[in-house]
Image (tube, helix red, strand yellow):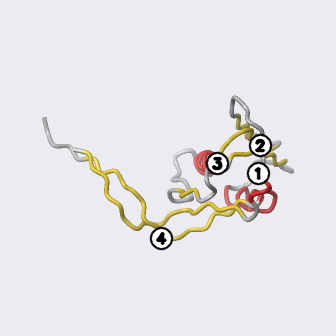
Amino acid sequence: DVHIVEDSIPCSIITLTDNNLLKVEQQDSSLITLNNKGLIAKNVSILYLLEYLNEKVKANIGDIPIDPPFIDKTNGAIGDFEIEFDNDIPTYSHLKELLEKKYGIRVKHKMEKYKIHIIKDIGT
């Protein structure tokens, strides 16, 4: 049995401080590269970029992602992002600071209504 309920839960609200920073020409494919030298993301939505980083940049592979579910309030903004690292991949929190400073991408935590899928085993 599957049903959806809407409840107020902690969410990560994504906004842009300046929509003019993200102008990208129509491209066919998307790309994200993350290594010790930097982050390169081409033709990706801000939502997808943050979901990717939230999952990939953790102290241990089995750790729970830092941010709760995202709510995109950027109207699906897509862009190209490039950040160079000095030594190694920074923490997820520091990466978000860098994205805010360079691209105006802001993530704030707040209680919001969110659709939750409930799956129940009804037996066989």
Mark 1 — residue? Answer: 22
Q: Indicate the secondary structure of the residue bearing disc 4.
A: strand
Q: Relative to the observer, which residue lies in front, 31 or 67?
A: 31
Q: Indicate the secondary structure of the residue bearing disc 1.
A: loop
Between label 3 and label 4, give the one nearer the viewer.
4
Q: Relative to the observer, which residue lies in front, 56 or 120?
A: 120
Mark 2 — residue? Answer: 24
Earlier sequence position, callout 2 versus callout 3: 2
- In three-dimensional space, the C-alpha distance between marks 4 and 2, rounded to whole angstroms, equals 32 Å
Mark 4 — residue? Answer: 111
Say what amino acid the circle numbered 2 marks: Val
Q: Quadrant of the N terminus?
A: top left
Q: Residues within 10 Å of mark 1 (few under 14, many from 20)?
A: some
Q: Indicate the secondary structure of the residue bearing disc 2.
A: loop
Q: Residue at x 83, y 49 (%)?
A: 85
Earlier sequence position, callout 3 versus callout 4: 3
What number is the disc on residue 53?
A: 3
Residue 70: x %, y % from top left? 54, 56
65 vs 96, left or right, is left
Earlier sequence position, callout 4 versus callout 2: 2
Q: Quadrant of the C terminus?
A: top left
Earlier sequence position, callout 1 versus callout 4: 1
